[in-house]
Image (spheres, rainbow, N blue to C red):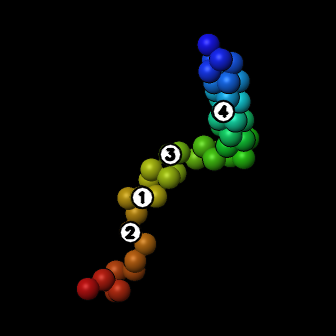
Amino acid sequence: MNVLAFLIPVSLILGGLGLAAFIWTIRSGQYGDPEGDAARILMDDTPPDARD
């Protein structure tokens, strides 16, 4: 039972840190353009004359 007195606050603190990190990523614009990233991976950046 003494272990629960230690583990419950630790789990609440870690959960709060995870929630704070998630909110920080949302506010900093990490998920701002998912469609653009999906389209950019399909584009070829090398010019046609540089291909071998």
Q: Secondary structure at mark 2?
A: loop
How far is mark 1 from mark 3, CA to CA?
Answer: 10 Å
Q: Nearer the viewer, mark 4 or mark 2?
A: 4
Is the residue marked by circle 3 packed among few (<14), some (14-19), or many (20+) residues within 10 Å? few
* Residue labelled with disc 2: 44
Nearer mark to the viewer, of 3 and 4: 4
For marks 1 and 2, give the CA distance: 8 Å
Name which of mark 3 and mark 2 comes first in the sequence: 3
In primary-sequence order, the first of circles 4 and 2 is: 4
Query: Helix, strand or loop at disc 3?
Result: helix
Q: Nearer the viewer, residue 44 or 24?
A: 24
Q: Which residue is mark 1?
A: 41
Residue 24 found in image quarter: top right
- The residue carrying mark 3 is 35
* First along the sequence among labels 1 and 4: 4
Categorize mark 1 by other alpha carbons within 10 Å: few (<14), some (14-19), many (20+): few
- Comparing 39 with 28, the one in front is 28
